[in-house]
Amino acid sequence: MSGHSGSVRAILYALGANIGIFIAKAVAAAITGSGAMLAEAVHSLADCGNQGLLLWGMKQAKRPPTPDYPLGYGKEVYFWSFLVALMLFSVGGAFSVYEGIHKMLVPEPIERPMIGVAVLAFSLALEWWSLRACLQEVNKTRGAQSLWRWFRDSRDSEMIVVFGEQLAALLGLAAALLAVGVTLYTGNPLYDAIGTLVIGVLLIVIAVFVAIEVKALLIGQSVSEEKREAIRAYLASRPEVHKLHNIITLQLGPDVMVSVKACLASGQSASEQVRQINEVEAGLRASFPDVRWSFFEPDEHD
């Protein structure tokens, strides 16, 4: 539950920052006519919608199991996370690429560029504040892993999406600020168009990486290797388990399913084996609170 509340906190930080940033960018884009600024405004608006979808997905994932969905709705958060990645690709990235190409074909001078520079600097500070809050939550779970390793191994789709969005926003703002600055220095609006195009490509690349990670969870991915080995070690250490044959884990949003095939001590009655299995499963849930479902199959062979 702590990881879930951390994800909500990071999303709310990002949502608050993006609402303020969108308003500032939209006003600045209307005043200056900057394509890079307009692309950034659209990107921030898309991010606000994306964070709303993530919050909705997390709420839907809490619904209890039903006969049609016996393992619950935990994986629904992956669907909404994947949808956010698609929106980041299309609404953010594709629009920025289109706007950049359009500005290259029909260059327009930037009006009142210092307003654009001031808004971008303000937005950069807000995005850094939001990304910092996101990294604080990420650091609670990644341990000694690098950010790249965490990104590849994490099973928290909401944090993957929020981190990807915030990183894209920060790099996009830096590109927009550079583009407006070079345009102001040279007087050539082509640099503004190039900056818009760079922002679009950047958003598309990050959206693809986010989509790849969420797709794995959507299809059905096990828990992380570290947790899987910890579960295996726990089960193998239980005195009731004579030999551990195999375990299968499945990440279902914030919940985990574990299937175990193991050999129990021979010569026991059926009721004694049931009692031992119940004790092993109760201990498993106590040691790993996110294990919501466990299935134990006693067998002499795998």
Image (spheres, rainbow, N blue to C red):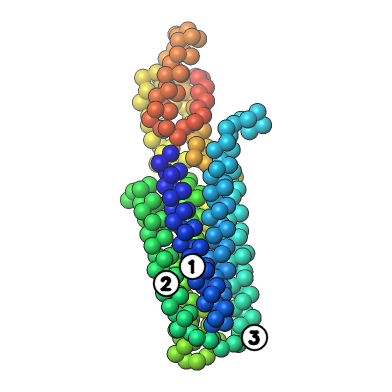
Of the numbered discs 2 and 1, the one sitting upstream in the chain is 1
Q: Is there any visible trace of residue 157 in the rendered image? A: yes
Q: Which quarter of the picture shows residue 43? A: bottom right
Separation (CA) of disc 2 from disc 1: 8 Å
Q: Which mark is residue 105?
A: 3
Residue 132: percent from the left, percent from the top? 37, 59
Comparing labels 2 and 3, the label whose residue is closer to the camera: 2
Q: Residue at x 41, y 32 (%)?
A: 288
Residue 193: percent from the left, percent from the top? 56, 82
Of the numbered discs 2 and 3, the one sitting upstream in the chain is 3
Q: Which mark is residue 122?
A: 2
Name the secondary structure under disc 1.
helix
Residue 259: percent from the left, percent from the top? 51, 29
Q: Which mark is residue 263?
A: none
Separation (CA) of disc 2 from disc 3: 30 Å
Is the residue 222 above or below the residue 187 in the image?
Answer: above
Q: Nearer the viewer, residue 36 or 296?
A: 36
Q: Is 41 displayed left or right of 98 in the figure? A: left
Of the numbered discs 3 and 1, the one sitting upstream in the chain is 1
Q: Nearer the viewer, residue 231 or 186?
A: 186
Is the residue 12 above or below the residue 64 in the image?
Answer: below
Density class for disc 1 (Cα within 10 Å; few <14, some 14-19, many ≥20) is many
User: Could you tell me if the residues under marks 3 and 1 are in contact, i.e. CB atoms within 8 Å?
Assistant: no
> Which residue has dot 1 on it?
21
Q: Is there any visible trace of residue 145 in the rendered image? A: no
